Amino acid sequence: MSNPSPKGVALITGASAGIGAIYADRLAKRGYDLILVARDQQRLNAIAERLRAEADVQVTPLPADLNDKAALAKVEAVLREDPNIAMLVNNAGVGSVASILQANVDKMEAMIDLNITALTRLTYAAAPAFAARGKGAIINISSAVAIAVENLNGVYSASKSYVLSFGHSLQKDLAEKGVRIQTLLPAATATEFWDIAGYAPQKTADTTMRAEDLVDAALAGFDAGELVTIPALHEAEAWTRWEQERRAMAAKFRNPKPAPRYHVA
Ligand SMILES: NC(=O)C1=CN([C@@H]2O[C@H](COP(=O)(O)OP(=O)(O)OC[C@H]3O[C@@H](n4cnc5c(N)ncnc54)[C@H](OP(=O)(O)O)[C@@H]3O)[C@@H](O)[C@H]2O)C=CC1
Ligand SMILES: N[C@@H](C=O)C(=O)O
Protein backbone atom coordinates (compact mmCIF):
# COMPACT_ATOMS: atom_id res chain seq x y z
CA MET A 1 0.00 0.00 0.00
CA SER A 2 1.21 3.54 -0.79
CA ASN A 3 2.10 6.02 1.98
CA PRO A 4 -0.51 8.63 2.96
CA SER A 5 -0.44 11.51 0.51
CA PRO A 6 1.02 14.82 1.71
CA LYS A 7 -1.90 16.46 -0.12
CA GLY A 8 -4.35 14.69 2.16
CA VAL A 9 -7.62 12.98 1.38
CA ALA A 10 -10.43 14.15 -0.90
CA LEU A 11 -13.87 12.77 -0.01
CA ILE A 12 -16.08 12.73 -3.11
CA THR A 13 -19.78 11.92 -3.01
CA GLY A 14 -21.43 10.41 -6.07
CA ALA A 15 -18.06 9.02 -7.11
CA SER A 16 -19.33 5.82 -8.73
CA ALA A 17 -20.26 7.45 -12.07
CA GLY A 18 -20.34 10.59 -14.16
CA ILE A 19 -18.82 13.82 -12.89
CA GLY A 20 -17.87 12.35 -9.49
CA ALA A 21 -15.94 9.48 -11.09
CA ILE A 22 -13.97 11.98 -13.20
CA TYR A 23 -13.23 14.05 -10.08
CA ALA A 24 -11.91 10.86 -8.49
CA ASP A 25 -9.66 10.23 -11.49
CA ARG A 26 -8.33 13.78 -11.70
CA LEU A 27 -7.80 14.26 -7.95
CA ALA A 28 -6.01 10.91 -7.68
CA LYS A 29 -3.73 12.02 -10.51
CA ARG A 30 -3.09 15.26 -8.61
CA GLY A 31 -1.89 13.08 -5.74
CA TYR A 32 -4.86 13.11 -3.35
CA ASP A 33 -5.83 9.99 -1.46
CA LEU A 34 -9.54 9.39 -1.89
CA ILE A 35 -12.65 8.35 -0.01
CA LEU A 36 -15.34 7.51 -2.55
CA VAL A 37 -19.00 7.65 -1.53
CA ALA A 38 -21.99 6.31 -3.51
CA ARG A 39 -24.49 3.45 -3.23
CA ASP A 40 -23.05 1.08 -5.84
CA GLN A 41 -20.26 -0.75 -4.03
CA GLN A 42 -19.13 -2.76 -7.08
CA ARG A 43 -18.62 0.36 -9.15
CA LEU A 44 -16.76 2.07 -6.30
CA ASN A 45 -14.50 -0.95 -5.87
CA ALA A 46 -13.67 -1.05 -9.58
CA ILE A 47 -12.79 2.67 -9.63
CA ALA A 48 -10.74 2.30 -6.45
CA GLU A 49 -8.78 -0.63 -7.85
CA ARG A 50 -8.01 1.20 -11.10
CA LEU A 51 -6.93 4.42 -9.40
CA ARG A 52 -4.69 2.65 -6.88
CA ALA A 53 -2.89 1.05 -9.81
CA GLU A 54 -2.77 4.12 -12.06
CA ALA A 55 -2.08 6.89 -9.53
CA ASP A 56 -0.42 5.07 -6.61
CA VAL A 57 -2.72 6.68 -4.02
CA GLN A 58 -4.86 5.25 -1.25
CA VAL A 59 -8.50 4.88 -2.27
CA THR A 60 -11.20 3.87 0.20
CA PRO A 61 -14.69 3.04 -1.06
CA LEU A 62 -17.33 4.14 1.45
CA PRO A 63 -20.66 2.77 0.20
CA ALA A 64 -23.55 4.84 1.54
CA ASP A 65 -27.02 5.86 0.51
CA LEU A 66 -27.02 9.56 1.40
CA ASN A 67 -30.82 9.47 1.50
CA ASP A 68 -30.53 7.18 4.50
CA LYS A 69 -30.03 9.18 7.71
CA ALA A 70 -27.91 6.51 9.42
CA ALA A 71 -25.65 6.06 6.39
CA LEU A 72 -25.33 9.82 5.99
CA ALA A 73 -24.38 10.12 9.68
CA LYS A 74 -21.50 7.66 9.12
CA VAL A 75 -20.10 9.81 6.31
CA GLU A 76 -20.52 12.91 8.49
CA ALA A 77 -18.55 11.17 11.26
CA VAL A 78 -15.71 10.39 8.85
CA LEU A 79 -15.55 14.07 7.84
CA ARG A 80 -15.52 15.19 11.46
CA GLU A 81 -12.99 12.65 12.69
CA ASP A 82 -10.44 11.95 9.93
CA PRO A 83 -7.76 14.67 10.29
CA ASN A 84 -6.31 13.84 6.87
CA ILE A 85 -9.35 15.01 4.93
CA ALA A 86 -8.36 18.12 2.99
CA MET A 87 -11.17 18.37 0.46
CA LEU A 88 -14.89 17.61 0.28
CA VAL A 89 -16.52 17.34 -3.15
CA ASN A 90 -20.29 17.45 -2.62
CA ASN A 91 -21.26 16.02 -5.98
CA ALA A 92 -23.98 13.37 -5.45
CA GLY A 93 -27.27 14.61 -6.85
CA VAL A 94 -30.28 13.67 -8.92
CA GLY A 95 -32.42 15.67 -11.31
CA SER A 96 -35.69 15.55 -13.17
CA VAL A 97 -37.26 17.17 -16.20
CA ALA A 98 -40.85 16.63 -14.99
CA SER A 99 -43.14 19.62 -14.36
CA ILE A 100 -45.05 20.00 -11.11
CA LEU A 101 -48.08 18.51 -12.89
CA GLN A 102 -46.14 15.32 -13.73
CA ALA A 103 -43.70 14.86 -10.85
CA ASN A 104 -44.23 12.70 -7.79
CA VAL A 105 -43.90 14.70 -4.59
CA ASP A 106 -42.19 11.84 -2.71
CA LYS A 107 -39.48 11.78 -5.41
CA MET A 108 -39.17 15.56 -5.05
CA GLU A 109 -38.68 15.18 -1.31
CA ALA A 110 -36.00 12.53 -1.90
CA MET A 111 -34.30 14.93 -4.32
CA ILE A 112 -34.31 17.67 -1.69
CA ASP A 113 -32.91 15.19 0.86
CA LEU A 114 -29.97 14.36 -1.43
CA ASN A 115 -29.31 17.64 -3.26
CA ILE A 116 -29.82 19.90 -0.24
CA THR A 117 -29.95 18.07 3.09
CA ALA A 118 -27.09 15.63 2.54
CA LEU A 119 -24.90 18.33 0.97
CA THR A 120 -25.64 20.66 3.89
CA ARG A 121 -25.01 18.07 6.60
CA LEU A 122 -21.73 16.97 5.00
CA THR A 123 -20.61 20.60 4.74
CA TYR A 124 -21.53 21.17 8.39
CA ALA A 125 -19.45 18.12 9.32
CA ALA A 126 -16.39 19.18 7.32
CA ALA A 127 -16.34 22.96 7.83
CA PRO A 128 -15.52 23.10 11.58
CA ALA A 129 -12.74 20.53 11.14
CA PHE A 130 -11.26 22.44 8.20
CA ALA A 131 -11.58 25.78 10.03
CA ALA A 132 -9.86 24.35 13.12
CA ARG A 133 -6.97 23.16 10.92
CA GLY A 134 -6.93 26.49 9.04
CA LYS A 135 -7.10 24.71 5.69
CA GLY A 136 -9.33 22.63 3.49
CA ALA A 137 -11.54 22.98 0.44
CA ILE A 138 -15.24 22.43 -0.15
CA ILE A 139 -16.40 22.04 -3.74
CA ASN A 140 -20.18 22.02 -4.12
CA ILE A 141 -21.77 20.94 -7.39
CA SER A 142 -24.66 23.21 -8.28
CA SER A 143 -25.90 23.58 -11.86
CA ALA A 144 -26.41 26.16 -14.59
CA VAL A 145 -30.12 25.76 -13.79
CA ALA A 146 -29.43 27.55 -10.51
CA ILE A 147 -29.59 30.58 -12.84
CA ALA A 148 -31.52 29.17 -15.82
CA VAL A 149 -34.21 28.11 -13.35
CA GLU A 150 -36.99 27.49 -15.87
CA ASN A 151 -35.02 24.86 -17.83
CA LEU A 152 -35.68 21.67 -15.82
CA ASN A 153 -37.85 20.48 -12.94
CA GLY A 154 -38.50 23.33 -10.52
CA VAL A 155 -37.49 21.48 -7.36
CA TYR A 156 -34.24 20.44 -9.03
CA SER A 157 -33.47 24.01 -10.16
CA ALA A 158 -34.37 25.40 -6.74
CA SER A 159 -32.16 22.80 -5.05
CA LYS A 160 -29.26 23.97 -7.21
CA SER A 161 -30.04 27.65 -6.49
CA TYR A 162 -29.77 26.69 -2.82
CA VAL A 163 -26.31 25.25 -3.44
CA LEU A 164 -25.23 28.47 -5.19
CA SER A 165 -26.52 30.69 -2.36
CA PHE A 166 -25.08 28.39 0.28
CA GLY A 167 -21.66 28.66 -1.37
CA HIS A 168 -21.73 32.47 -1.11
CA SER A 169 -22.54 32.27 2.60
CA LEU A 170 -19.85 29.63 3.15
CA GLN A 171 -17.36 31.97 1.51
CA LYS A 172 -18.42 34.76 3.89
CA ASP A 173 -18.12 32.49 6.95
CA LEU A 174 -15.03 30.47 6.05
CA ALA A 175 -12.69 32.36 3.70
CA GLU A 176 -10.84 34.04 6.55
CA LYS A 177 -10.45 30.68 8.30
CA GLY A 178 -8.32 29.38 5.46
CA VAL A 179 -11.10 27.26 3.92
CA ARG A 180 -11.50 27.39 0.14
CA ILE A 181 -15.02 27.29 -1.31
CA GLN A 182 -15.90 26.63 -4.93
CA THR A 183 -19.37 26.29 -6.39
CA LEU A 184 -19.47 24.57 -9.77
CA LEU A 185 -22.32 25.23 -12.19
CA PRO A 186 -22.21 22.55 -14.91
CA ALA A 187 -24.54 23.00 -17.86
CA ALA A 188 -25.73 19.88 -19.68
CA THR A 189 -23.03 17.22 -19.29
CA ALA A 190 -22.95 13.73 -20.81
CA THR A 191 -23.69 11.43 -17.86
CA GLU A 192 -26.33 8.99 -16.61
CA PHE A 193 -27.93 12.01 -14.92
CA TRP A 194 -30.11 12.40 -18.02
CA ASP A 195 -31.36 8.78 -17.98
CA ILE A 196 -32.43 9.25 -14.38
CA ALA A 197 -33.81 12.75 -14.97
CA GLY A 198 -36.06 11.45 -17.76
CA TYR A 199 -34.50 12.94 -20.90
CA ALA A 200 -31.82 10.54 -22.19
CA PRO A 201 -31.37 12.30 -25.61
CA GLN A 202 -29.66 15.24 -23.85
CA LYS A 203 -26.62 13.00 -23.27
CA THR A 204 -25.80 12.97 -26.97
CA ALA A 205 -27.02 16.46 -27.93
CA ASP A 206 -24.36 18.59 -29.60
CA THR A 207 -24.76 21.24 -26.88
CA THR A 208 -23.78 18.75 -24.16
CA MET A 209 -20.28 18.81 -22.63
CA ARG A 210 -18.08 15.78 -21.93
CA ALA A 211 -17.74 15.12 -18.20
CA GLU A 212 -13.94 15.01 -18.61
CA ASP A 213 -13.88 18.53 -20.11
CA LEU A 214 -16.24 19.80 -17.43
CA VAL A 215 -14.09 18.55 -14.55
CA ASP A 216 -10.81 19.68 -16.15
CA ALA A 217 -12.28 23.19 -16.54
CA ALA A 218 -13.68 23.06 -12.99
CA LEU A 219 -10.26 22.21 -11.56
CA ALA A 220 -8.65 24.97 -13.64
CA GLY A 221 -11.22 27.34 -12.08
CA PHE A 222 -10.36 25.96 -8.64
CA ASP A 223 -6.64 26.54 -9.28
CA ALA A 224 -7.45 30.10 -10.37
CA GLY A 225 -9.22 30.72 -7.04
CA GLU A 226 -12.72 31.10 -8.51
CA LEU A 227 -15.61 31.09 -6.04
CA VAL A 228 -18.08 30.22 -8.81
CA THR A 229 -17.05 28.27 -11.90
CA ILE A 230 -19.28 27.96 -14.97
CA PRO A 231 -17.32 26.02 -17.59
CA ALA A 232 -19.93 26.38 -20.35
CA LEU A 233 -20.19 30.17 -20.01
CA HIS A 234 -17.79 31.63 -22.56
CA GLU A 235 -18.67 35.24 -21.74
CA ALA A 236 -17.17 35.41 -18.24
CA GLU A 237 -18.18 39.08 -17.92
CA ALA A 238 -21.86 38.01 -17.90
CA TRP A 239 -21.31 36.38 -14.50
CA THR A 240 -19.28 39.34 -13.23
CA ARG A 241 -22.04 41.76 -14.24
CA TRP A 242 -24.75 39.58 -12.62
CA GLU A 243 -22.79 39.41 -9.36
CA GLN A 244 -22.09 43.15 -9.33
CA GLU A 245 -25.78 43.91 -9.90
CA ARG A 246 -26.84 41.46 -7.20
CA ARG A 247 -24.45 42.90 -4.63
CA ALA A 248 -25.44 46.47 -5.56
CA MET A 249 -29.15 45.63 -5.13
CA ALA A 250 -28.42 43.81 -1.84
CA ALA A 251 -27.23 47.12 -0.40
CA LYS A 252 -30.63 48.73 -1.10
CA PHE A 253 -32.97 46.61 1.08
CA ARG A 254 -32.64 48.31 4.48
CA ASN A 255 -35.72 50.54 4.36
CA PRO A 256 -38.31 50.80 7.17
CA LYS A 257 -41.02 51.90 4.71
CA PRO A 258 -42.36 50.07 1.63
CA ALA A 259 -41.53 51.66 -1.71
CA PRO A 260 -43.92 54.49 -2.82
CA ARG A 261 -45.28 52.31 -5.67
CA TYR A 262 -47.20 50.24 -3.06
CA HIS A 263 -49.04 53.35 -1.79
CA VAL A 264 -48.87 52.32 1.89
CA ALA A 265 -49.87 55.36 3.96
N1 LIG B 1 -25.07 15.81 -15.96
C1 LIG B 1 -25.50 17.07 -16.02
O1 LIG B 1 -25.94 17.56 -17.10
C2 LIG B 1 -25.43 17.94 -14.84
C3 LIG B 1 -25.19 17.46 -13.57
N2 LIG B 1 -25.16 18.32 -12.50
C4 LIG B 1 -24.93 17.82 -11.15
O2 LIG B 1 -23.72 17.10 -11.11
C5 LIG B 1 -23.75 16.16 -10.05
C6 LIG B 1 -23.28 14.82 -10.56
O3 LIG B 1 -24.19 14.37 -11.53
P1 LIG B 1 -23.78 13.44 -12.75
O4 LIG B 1 -22.42 12.92 -12.60
O5 LIG B 1 -24.14 14.16 -13.98
O6 LIG B 1 -24.87 12.28 -12.56
P2 LIG B 1 -24.71 10.69 -12.48
O7 LIG B 1 -26.12 10.18 -12.42
O8 LIG B 1 -23.82 10.23 -13.56
O9 LIG B 1 -23.98 10.47 -11.09
C7 LIG B 1 -24.63 10.70 -9.87
C8 LIG B 1 -23.80 10.12 -8.76
O10 LIG B 1 -24.49 10.31 -7.52
C9 LIG B 1 -24.61 9.05 -6.85
N3 LIG B 1 -25.84 9.01 -6.09
C10 LIG B 1 -27.12 9.13 -6.55
N4 LIG B 1 -28.00 8.99 -5.54
C11 LIG B 1 -27.25 8.78 -4.41
C12 LIG B 1 -27.57 8.54 -3.06
N5 LIG B 1 -28.83 8.48 -2.64
N6 LIG B 1 -26.56 8.35 -2.17
C13 LIG B 1 -25.27 8.39 -2.58
N7 LIG B 1 -24.91 8.62 -3.85
C14 LIG B 1 -25.89 8.80 -4.76
C15 LIG B 1 -24.61 8.01 -7.98
O11 LIG B 1 -24.11 6.76 -7.53
P3 LIG B 1 -24.96 5.50 -7.03
O12 LIG B 1 -26.09 5.32 -7.99
O13 LIG B 1 -23.93 4.42 -7.02
O14 LIG B 1 -25.40 5.87 -5.64
C16 LIG B 1 -23.57 8.63 -8.91
O15 LIG B 1 -22.27 8.30 -8.47
C17 LIG B 1 -25.19 16.18 -9.53
O16 LIG B 1 -25.24 16.94 -8.35
C18 LIG B 1 -25.97 16.86 -10.64
O17 LIG B 1 -27.11 17.52 -10.17
C19 LIG B 1 -25.35 19.67 -12.65
C20 LIG B 1 -25.59 20.19 -13.89
C21 LIG B 1 -25.64 19.39 -15.07
N1 LIG C 1 -27.10 22.10 -15.59
C1 LIG C 1 -27.77 21.09 -16.33
C2 LIG C 1 -28.56 20.29 -15.42
O1 LIG C 1 -28.44 20.33 -14.23
C3 LIG C 1 -28.46 21.77 -17.47
O2 LIG C 1 -28.09 22.92 -17.71
O3 LIG C 1 -29.28 21.18 -18.15
Image (cartoon, rainbow, N blue to C red):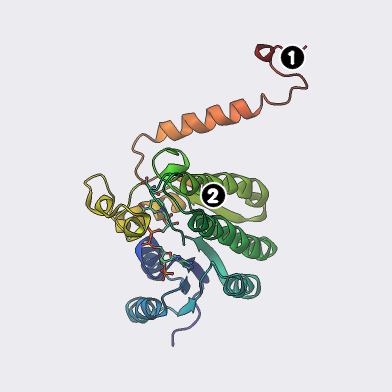
Q: Amino acid at mark 2?
A: Val
Q: Amino acid at mark 1?
A: Val
Check disc 2 and report the residue beneath it. Answer: 163
Above or below: residue 149 compared with residue 244? below
Q: Secondary structure at mark 1?
A: loop
Q: Please name whichever residue, 12 or 120, is drawn nearer the observer in this view of the structure.
A: 120
Q: Residue furthest bottom?
A: 1
Please give left or right for residue 50 compared with residue 15 in the image.
left
| Image x and y of residue 45, in percent | 39, 81
Q: Please name whichever residue, 59 or 178, is drawn nearer the observer in this view of the structure.
A: 59
Query: Which of disc 2 and disc 1 is earlier in sequence?
Result: 2
Q: Please name whichever residue, 71 or 103, is drawn nearer the observer in this view of the structure.
A: 103
Image quadrant containing the C terminus: top right
| Image x and y of residue 245, in percent | 54, 27
Above or below: residue 24 compared with residue 3? above
Q: Is mark 2 within 8 Å of ligand 1?
A: no
Check disc 1 and report the residue beneath it. Answer: 264
Above or below: residue 62 compared with residue 204? below
| Image x and y of residue 145, in percent | 43, 43
Q: Residue at x 63, y 29 (%)?
A: 250
Q: Is residue 172 visible?
A: yes
Q: Please name whichever residue, 194 or 5, is drawn nearer the observer in this view of the structure.
A: 194
Between the C-alphas of marks 1 and 2, the distance is 36 Å
